[in-house]
Image (spheres, grey):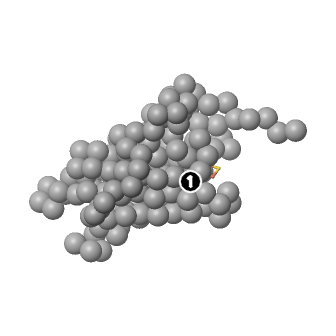
């Protein structure tokens, strides 16, 4: 029998009350990733200030596990107000730290959040 992963209080907090959850109407860019391993899907929406390149608003939808939802939720908090260049530097280690750790078998869920963010930024830069 496999045991359930132990989550930190921070993970539980973000999973139970995700921040910036939902769809955005008319985003400036969107990034979507799926994990072939678990079949989960993550989608991020960005509003970007054209002049300063700051991320003014960010929303997400995740059809995935608790760690995926918590990772994306905490990521949106970290990214708001940052420039695209600053946001690009975030890694899964930053998410792991903010969430006060993640079980090893759930690290790929935080990687998905970073990939969705990078994809959204890449799509923004391609269109602007
Ligand atoms: S198990 Fe699929 S994203 Fe976490």
**Residue drawn at x 24%, y 44% as measured from the top left:** 81
Q: Which residue was labeled with disc 1?
A: 63
Q: Is residue 21 above or below residue 13?
A: below
User: Is 1 on the left-hand or right-hand side of 28?
Assistant: right
Task: Indicate the quadrant where residue 5 lies.
Answer: top right
Q: Is residue 25 above or below residue 126?
A: above
**Could you tell me which quadrant the C terminus lies in?**
bottom left
User: Is 20 on the left-hand or right-hand side of 9?
Assistant: left
Residue 115: x percent and y percent? 47, 58
**Could you tell me which quadrant the N terminus lies in?**
top right
Residue 89: x percent and y percent? 36, 51
Q: Is residue 35 above or below residue 68?
A: below
Judge whether residue 59 can be spotted in this image.
yes
Q: Is mark 1 within 8 Å of ligand 1?
A: no
Q: For the residue labelled by badge 1, is the local secondary structure a helix, a strand or a loop?
A: strand
User: Is 15 on the left-hand or right-hand side of 19?
Assistant: right
In front: 61, or 118?
61
Task: Indicate the quadrant where residue 77 lies.
Answer: top left
């Amino acid at each position: 029998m496999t045991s359930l992963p132990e989550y930190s209080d921070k993970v539980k907090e973000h999973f139970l009350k995700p921040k910036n959850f939902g769809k955005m109407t008319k985003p400036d860019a969107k990034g979507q990733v799926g994990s072939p391993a678990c079949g989960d899907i993550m989608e991020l929406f960005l509003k970007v200030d054209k002049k300063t390149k700051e991320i003014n608003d960010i929303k997400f939808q995740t059809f995935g596990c608790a760690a995926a939802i918590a990772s994306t939720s905490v990521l949106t908090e970290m990214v708001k107000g940052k420039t695209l260049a600053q946001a690009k530097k975030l890694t899964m280690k930053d998410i792991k730290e903010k969430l006060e750790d993640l079980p090893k078998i759930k690290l790929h869920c935080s990687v998905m959040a970073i990939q969705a963010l990078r994809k959204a930024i890449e799509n923004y830069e391609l269109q602007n």
